[in-house]
Image: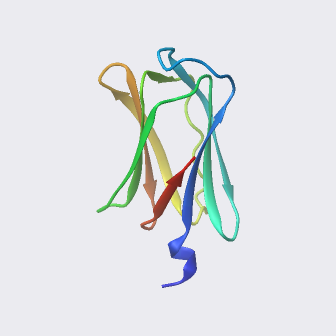
């Protein structure tokens, strides 16, 4: 398989302010960057989030759970020409948490920071 399919996926959480974990996290936007070596998604958030990231197969998707969070506006969708990301959807989990699901065009390995 080409190295391209072994791409590392980086989930960046850009922190706009530092606060305690008890404070609600507002997700304001989502940005995508792509280079020859990596694909990155960055969420702009209002507080330091507690999150869990995992990958699922059949179909391939990336799931991000953010505790005590809400979405302030609809997330931007990747370009239809994007080599890895197909679409992004979000919903509420347990009435307080935010779940973001990224449908993928191919399986990935993931890293988050």
Q: How many marks?
A: 0
Closer to us: 81 or 65: 65
The answer to whether 75 is drawn above or below residue 55 in the figure is above
The answer to whether 44 is drawn above or below residue 32 in the figure is above
Q: Residue at x 60, y 18 (%)?
A: 19
Q: How far across and how far down the image is residue 11, in percent?
A: 56, 48
The answer to whether 3 is drawn above or below residue 9 in the figure is below
Q: How far across and how far down the image is residue 14, in percent?
A: 66, 36
Q: Residue at x 47, y 15 (%)?
A: 22
Closer to us: 18 or 16: 18
Closer to us: 76 or 13: 13
The answer to whether 19 is drawn above or below residue 112 in the figure is above
Q: Is residue 76 left or right of residue 61?
A: right
Q: How far across and how far down the image is residue 24, in percent?
A: 50, 16
- The colour scheme used to paint the residues is rainbow
Q: Residue at x 70, y 65 (%)?
A: 35
The image quarter containing residue 46 is: top right
Q: How far across and how far down the image is residue 69, in percent?
A: 47, 23
Outermost residue on the top side: it is 23
Outermost residue on the bottom side: it is 1
Q: Residue at x 49, y 50 (%)?
A: 87
């Amino acid at each position: 398989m080409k190295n391209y399919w072994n791409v590392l996926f980086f989930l960046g959480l850009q922190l706009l302010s530092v606060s305690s974990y008890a404070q609600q996290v507002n997700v304001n936007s989502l940005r995508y960057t792509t280079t020859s070596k990596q694909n990155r998604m960055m969420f702009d958030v209002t507080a330091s989030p507690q999150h869990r990231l995992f990958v699922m197969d059949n179909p391939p998707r990336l799931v991000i759970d953010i505790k005590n969070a809400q979405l302030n506006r609809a997330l931007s969708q990747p370009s239809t020409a994007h080599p890895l990301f197909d679409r992004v959807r979000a919903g509420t989990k347990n009435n307080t948490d935010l779940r973001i699901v990224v449908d993928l065009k191919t399986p990935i390995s993931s890293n988050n920071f």
